[in-house]
Amino acid sequence: MTAIKAEIITIGDEILYGQITDTNSQWMSERLTEIGVKVIRKTAIGDTKEAITEALDKAKKEAQIVLMTGGLGPTKDDITKKTLANYFDTELIFNENVYENIGRLLRQFGRELTEQNKNQAEVLKICDVLQNEVGTAPGMWIDHEGCVFVSMPGVPHEMKFLMSEHVLPRLEEKYIPGHIIHKVIRTIGIPESKLSQMLEDWELALPENIGLAYLPKLGQVRLRLTAVGEDKEAIELQLESEVLKLKSIVTKGIYAEEDIELEEVVGIILKQRDMTVATAESCTGGNVANKITDISGSSAYFKGGIIPYSNEIKMDQLGVRAETLEKYGAVSEQTAKEMAENVRKKFNASVGISTTGIAGPTGGTPDKPVGTIWIGYSDGKKTEAKLLNITRGRKINVQYTTTAVLRLLWSNLANEN
Amino acid sequence: MTAIKAEIITIGDEILYGQITDTNSQWMSERLTEIGVKVIRKTAIGDTKEAITEALDKAKKEAQIVLMTGGLGPTKDDITKKTLANYFDTELIFNENVYENIGRLLRQFGRELTEQNKNQAEVLKICDVLQNEVGTAPGMWIDHEGCVFVSMPGVPHEMKFLMSEHVLPRLEEKYIPGHIIHKVIRTIGIPESKLSQMLEDWELALPENIGLAYLPKLGQVRLRLTAVGEDKEAIELQLESEVLKLKSIVTKGIYAEEDIELEEVVGIILKQRDMTVATAESCTGGNVANKITDISGSSAYFKGGIIPYSNEIKMDQLGVRAETLEKYGAVSEQTAKEMAENVRKKFNASVGISTTGIAGPTGGTPDKPVGTIWIGYSDGKKTEAKLLNITRGRKINVQYTTTAVLRLLWSNLANEN
């Protein structure tokens, strides 16, 4: 089947001048791709009548869906909305519901309605208003000459609300025959090239209505299966059966059969088993604890952590032995093991994990160059350490190490090592 | 003067499908804006001949500079380069220097040259080759019918290398008469609206060749002054004099007169004074330590930190008194103060800082709702705590708290409170 095509237009000088990074269009593309819509172009333009008109003209020649964000702030209101009114040969009318919504939101913050807010409550006469419950600028859906145009504010959580609650469901209903179901399998520690080799035969034998995408990131690969069909239950069963086959091929390294992060999976397992974890981080400087505590409710299984950045603190606060540091150094298997073991004991946790290494760019030596990093694990029955060699920039080295130590924790919990 | 106009074109399906976020174009826009080039549009397109040709046609109608990234990976090589050769009515020729560079890079990773690498060494006959010292795909500079086209790989650090070493200097030389100098003043704790009110008269009186931009982010505002002129020394003096005036108006809240982060400024002051810091973080879960250790060389002044995520650990490991926790609770002025004071003593640091609060979305109570956060500071002479009320999502709450506690540390060091 020929895919429905979409263009994403971002309006706003702040994007053109590089004052902010556009993360909206990535999120929108991903969602559109998931419902089977093909994004053919993204265009970022300034807040001018000419630029907006030209972009709309160009978009509607090739796309059936044109999604616009931005240009709706209280101070910019006029240009975008007036240009749209002009473009669609209609007028702006005051909308009571939108005005009430703005009033409700402002009262929450103890603020009064102003004349400017009246302007914000004006919408295109020919549009379907998409009520924005989380912000003052409404969304507008315009069906015009066989093409759907949607105007949304550029504030990410407002755009996401409007897309999830209104735009995506309406697009699916209008354009997508039957159902689209996704299944994400998350893997870690298998390079994309190896994974695709392992899965080659299976992939070739996939039914025609099932597509596969490899989405790699920092040592992980997300596999996204997309099934399209009339009968929802039938394609769900089909997907399940393919996932079973996939799991008989990839027997190690799958940490989730849904689209959630490794730290969340680890948290779920720890909670289920009534276990707790504590962290001792040197080179990651708190990043591991930060990831673990990104998850709301992590206080149920995260006891806490220590960041012994100097040898003095490693000894005084974490009880790493002076001989160990002297004989093997702070960046060593022995130190990583003692750190993991000691933080587990001191913090009275079921499991301790640790990192110690040279994140760079300074601090390397001939026998321990930048990127020499040890990670440790200890659970009372066993204590182990692994050596990593990562030769990227400081921040990426820290991110890789964080993922690696969470993987070490997970593989022990999941009995995968 | 009329600004020179540029368009940025990003080539690659992975951007259209939302598999990666485009951060390149933000960086490029910022750099172009800095040298006085006006970005009029950004376009992201797929790897097809039609899309590339159409985008180039459109760009050259309005812009004098067209910067392309992407579409040059070893597997995609053909489409972009062949389309460009076709577009500029030229051919691809093998370039010995590029081939040697690829060989040198591969040898570093212990790999051999393959037939594919020969293709990578092909460049447009009419281009100036921009040697890519950090990757295998070369940059190409094409001067064509009064417009400059540049093709670069999409890998961020390769694009940045080519832009910094080749493209920006050449653009400046070609298009920018005289000199452009920037001066960034970083402020914290003054809302943008208030700052612009304070600076209104000064801004209006700025010489015509000096421009001002407000760049706000998470409670901070960067002020960027841009001066243009023939005589470099003269405009440097001019800028200096304006900065002096600005500082006589904004007497508090300026933490840097260059474009560096708060954590780096704090590090510089601590190092200068031979002081050290230690962190005790509850609700920020390691994010403060993580920011401090983002700076290479931070081991000179960062002793370490503790993340006492449970009351048990707050008492056992950090020595917070049981009465304090019982009487005032973990989220209280008293606990924040004890945390800061105790971590300073235990870690033998000059200064201790602390965070304790409810980051959300769960864990709030009627008298301590989500977003109730205390931050603490202790330096041996004085110990203080501040209450924050932040009602954003969990991650943003953590980021704001991190910035707030670094600000508390800085304002004490800088004697600004």
Image: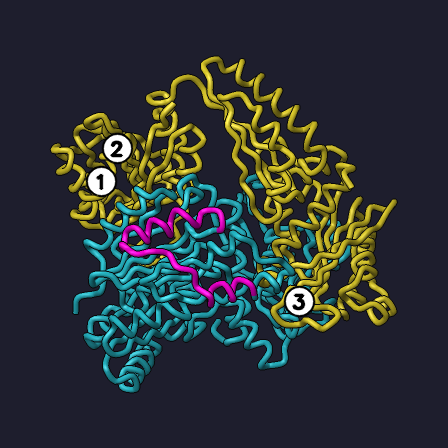
Chain colours: A cyan, B yellow
Q: Are marks 1 and 3 in contact (CB under 8 Å)?
A: no
Taking the spot 59% from the left edge, 37% from the top edge, the residue there is: B260
- Lower position in the chain sequence, tag 2 or tag 1: 1
Residue B201: quarter of image: top right
Badge 3 sits on which subunit?
A: B
Q: Is residue B97 visible?
A: no
Which residue is under mark 3? B370
* Rendering coords of residue A151 (x, y %): 36, 58
Instruction: Give me the C-alpha separation between circle 2 and circle 3.
Output: 52 Å
Taking the spot 73% from the left edge, 61% from the top edge, the residue there is: B356
Q: Secondary structure at mark 1?
A: helix
- Crowding around mark 3 (Cα neighbors within 10 Å: few <14, some 14 to 19, many 20+) is many
* Rendering coords of residue B317 (x, y %): 78, 63
Q: Nearer the viewer, residue A63 or B153?
A: A63
Taking the spot 65% from the left edge, 59% from the top edge, the residue there is: B390
The quarter in which the C terminus of chain B is drawn is top right
Which residue is under mark 1? B58
Badge 2 sits on which subunit?
A: B
For the residue marked with disc 1, what is the amino acid?
Lys
Write down the region rendered in magenta. Answer: A74-103
For the residue marked with disc 3, what is the amino acid?
Val
Q: Secondary structure at mark 2?
A: strand
Badge 1 sits on which subunit?
A: B
The quarter in which the N terminus of chain B is drawn is top left
Q: Nearer the viewer, residue B307 or A61?
A: A61
- Lower position in the chain sequence, tag 2 or tag 3: 2
Position of residue A273 relative to residue B34, above or below, is below
Q: Secondary structure at mark 3?
A: loop
For the residue marked with disc 2, what is the amino acid?
Phe
- Lower position in the chain sequence, tag 1 or tag 3: 1
Instruction: Give me the C-alpha separation between circle 2 and circle 1.
Output: 13 Å
Q: Nearer the viewer, residue A198 or B26?
A: B26
